[in-house]
């Protein structure tokens, strides 16, 4: 993936929430309790919109694909011109894919929806850059199918909210793995944990063998 060979990188999952994977010093950072990366729930807004976590004003309420779909429905009900077909009553995954496809086909309204979400994500990314100074920020997940449409609004947010000498050393990339990145990442974690557990068992076995040898020598 795009974060390969990078010691410090962050992967943003643009989906129903706005997830975050952190690679720090070449290792996946999980935090004290394994919950590091709850990027969706940083409080950026005073919009009085209830988030899935029970709080209000979280990044998720303005920048998730679910929020994008809700904004699209509201604007279309008010008569907004768009080539987008009626998404009312559609499941979120289908509706969001329709919006992404519309943006990729040049529909101005769909581009605006994703650009608005991208700008809000960029505000959060500016905070991450100030705190952790990563080499790269990679946009992944279902939303990454919109490709380079994300880059301009993200960069605009960084231009406005980030210290230039910090943002200059951070690349904004779009994952080529897209939605499959989550599946590949999950499989990689399973394999990694399997190898770690095997190594522990082997080390434990080796220690037992050493103890038995020592006992035999003593007798």
Image (cartoon, helix red, strand yellow):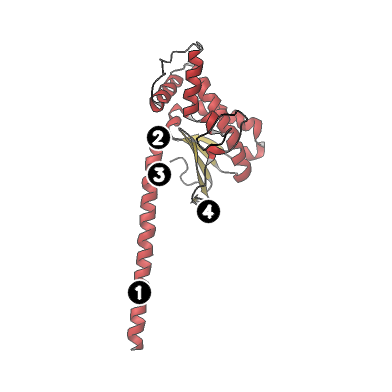
How far apart in space, not on screen, are marks 2 and 4 (Cα)? 28 Å
CB contact under 8 Å: marks 2 and 4 = no
Mark closer to the chain start, 4 or 3: 4
Mark closer to the chain start, 2 or 1: 2
How far apart in space, not on screen, are marks 2 and 3 (Cα)? 11 Å
Q: Is residue 212 above or below residue 11?
A: below
Q: Residue at x 65, y 33 (%)?
A: 161
Reading the image, the residue beneath label 1 is 208
> On the rendered image, what quadrant is the N terminus found in?
top left
Of residue 89 and residue 145, the one placed in the foreground of this image is 89
Mark 4 crowd level (few <14, some 14–19, many ≥20, 10 Å Cα)? few
Mark closer to the chain start, 2 or 4: 4
Residue that lies at the very extreme toward the bottom in this rendered image: 219
How far apart in space, not on screen, are marks 4 and 3 (Cα)? 21 Å
Could you say which disc has been placed on residue 179 in the image? Answer: 2
How far apart in space, not on screen, are marks 2 and 1 (Cα)? 45 Å
Of residue 67 and residue 161, the one placed in the foreground of this image is 67
Reading the image, the residue beneath label 4 is 32
Of residue 183 and residue 93, the one placed in the foreground of this image is 93
Q: Is residue 189 above or below residue 206?
A: above
Quarter of image, res 145: top left
Reading the image, the residue beneath label 3 is 185
What percent of the width, then of the height, locates residue 184? 37, 42
């Amino acid at each position: 993936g795009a974060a390969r060979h990078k010691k410090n990188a962050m992967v943003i999952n643009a989906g129903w929430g706005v997830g975050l994977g952190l690679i720090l010093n070449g290792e996946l950072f999980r935090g004290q309790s394994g919950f590091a990366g709850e990027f969706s729930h940083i409080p950026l807004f005073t919009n009085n919109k209830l988030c899935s976590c029970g709080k209000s004003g979280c990044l998720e309420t303005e920048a998730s694909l679910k929020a994008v779909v809700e904004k699209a429905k509201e604007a279309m009900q008010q008569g907004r011109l768009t080539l987008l077909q009626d998404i009312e009553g559609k499941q979120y995954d289908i509706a969001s894919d329709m919006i992404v496809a519309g943006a990729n086909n040049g529909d101005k309204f769909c581009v605006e929806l994703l650009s608005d979400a991208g700008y809000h994500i960029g505000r959060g990314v500016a905070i991450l850059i100030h705190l952790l100074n990563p080499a790269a920020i990679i946009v992944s997940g279902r939303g990454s199918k919109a490709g380079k449409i994300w880059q301009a609004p993200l960069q605009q947010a960084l231009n406005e909210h980030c210290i230039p000498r910090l943002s200059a050393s951070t690349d904004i990339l779009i994952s080529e793995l897209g939605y499959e990145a989550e599946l590949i990442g999950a499989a990689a974690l399973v394999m990694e944990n399997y190898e770690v557990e095997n190594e522990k068992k082997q080390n434990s076995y080796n220690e037992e063998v050493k103890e038995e040898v020592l006992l035999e020598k003593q007798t």
